Amino acid sequence: MTTLRITDGVIKDEVLVLGLASSSSKTGLVIESGDLSIDTKSILASLVEMGATGNADEVIKVPGATVRMLVFTGLGKKASSYSPEVLRRAAGAASRALNGLTGATFALPTDSLNSVAAVAEGAALGAYVFSEFKGSSKSEHKAAIKSITVFSKLAQSSEAKPAIARARIIADYTFLVRDLINTPPSHLTPDSFSKKLIAAVKTAGGAKAGLKVSVLDEKELKTQGFGGIIGVGQGSANPPRLLHISYNPKSAKKRFAFVGKGITFDTGGLNLKPGLGMEAMKSDMSGAAAVCAATLAIAALKLPIAIETWAPLAENMPSDKATRPSDIITIFGGKTIEVLNPDAEGRLVLADGLVKAQSSKNKLDGIIDVATLTGAQVIALGTRTSAVMTNSQEFSSEFLTACAESGEQFWPMPLPQELRASLDSPVADMANIGDKSGGMLVAGLFLKEFVAPELPWLHLDIAGPAFNTAAAHGYTPVGGTGVALRSLVVLAEMA
């Protein structure tokens, strides 16, 4: 694990990371070294000759005089003050490029504690490597940088060390999400997912930290009427589970419920997906991973807010036992669903989870579901922006404020009532699919049916941003990203 600290003293690391921005100056570049004074003239000339631009995601390494290596990371256009997300991404891009090294000091602009936190968080998030399944080539696979130091004159502030500690917690639990997503489905089934989270809860302190965990197996799910989870998971040799993690601090001011889609692999069931791209369906449990890890992060930060987290887990496979198109299932609570498309399975397990989350005697102040739910999300918003749908504009506004602080990109989407009729079924209470046009919104309308109208609810569709199949960028690696965790944590901090 990469260590993280802050200093305003002598630089001891072999690598020094500095910012580089484009400007209207003669050279067209400016070095941003924050609170560290350095002679930039000769270095700037070399950078210009190398064709440096200072653009975001640009990382340039050159030999240093007082340190072994200088690393310049792009900040974009020169600014009097850089936003936390610009700093977060620049620090992340640099730390991604430093695998195999012992330590680096990051001297980027840190004119506020928010800037310090952003640099620390970005650098920590970028220092991620997943090599668990490397075999003969593992020795060639460089480990993440061992030590990261943030250089800032604010190092002696009473709030500096807590900011660094928070960044470490955010990175640790984001890595848990990424690890779960990147784990192949042969090693991550509903049962093994549950066991990994039980172990994570224990490591986080268990009952002493206010955490409890329980799991319903396939027999209990069937007996208790979880028709969505059973219906999706019955075609697989790996039976479904319902994981519950609760965090109940004595000082809790509010109580939220999180529900995360946990399809450990999605073939589409009897509505088999095309082979091209199916390998990415190991990421269909990203929502479950995000809400579970966010709960542990909230507990680690000792926030005064209670969280009830539900992760319905299933593997959607084709077999002689799989749910057939036109089968009717009964969701927990009694609503019947005609399954017209077994590949629209995420909403079925989420429906069970949403109803169960509301069955507690404890009053909820809000409920949030997180899911890689629809391909339509990717078509509408691309691979870096997630969608937010809601029955409460106030709750949505609070969440979007949290997103602005966390740096995660979410965009509000409507739930047009005229699309609801497309979910009507002549033989059941509802069908699981409706209009293809606006498919993301139709899926949101389906889930809305399982939430009490008076309970503030958010539906986060993270289908594109959850799994990066393109090039790494900023603090985001290829593969699982951990999206939604940071925003859920910030929302809890704001509550």
Image (cartoon, rainbow, N blue to C red):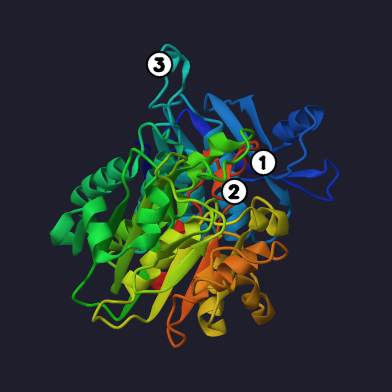
- Binning the other alpha carbons within 10 Å of mark 3 as few (below 14), some (14 to 19) or many (20 upward) gives few
Using the rendered image of the protein, determine whether residue 178 is visible from the camera's viewpoint: yes
In the rendered image, residue 209, in percent from the top left (x then y), is placed at 18, 61
Q: CA distance from mark 1 to mark 2?
A: 8 Å
- Compared across the picture, whether 24 is left or right of 118 comes to right
Closer-to-camera residue (63/399)? 399
- Against 468, residue 135 (above or below) is above
In 3D space, how far apart are the residues under numbered discs 3 and 1 (Cα atoms)? 30 Å
In the picture as drawn, the residue positioned furthest to the top comes out as 136
Local SS, label 3: loop
- Label 1 crowd (10 A; few <14 / some 14-19 / many >=20): many
> Between residues 24 and 221, which one lies in front from this camera angle?
221
Q: Residue furthest bottom?
A: 454
445 vs 193, nearest the viewer: 445
Q: Check the image and report above or below for 445 versus 318.
A: below
Q: x, y percentage for residue 317?
A: 45, 41
Q: Which residue is mark 1?
A: 57
Image quarter for residue 434?
A: bottom right
- Name the residue rendered at 61%, 33% in the picture: 275
- Mark 2 sits on what residue? 89
Q: Residue placed at 65% from the left, 50% from the top?
A: 383
Task: Check if mark 1's residue and mark 2's residue have beta carbons within 8 Å.
Answer: yes
Q: Secondary structure at mark 1?
A: loop
Q: Nearer the viewer, mark 3 or mark 1?
A: 3
Residue at x-position 33% and y-position 76%: 358
Residue type marked 2: Arg
Q: Residue at x 53, y 83 (%)?
A: 392
79 above or below 174? below
Query: In the image, residue 253 lies at what x, y percent?
Result: 29, 81
Q: Which residue is mark 3?
A: 135
> Disc 3 residue type?
Gly
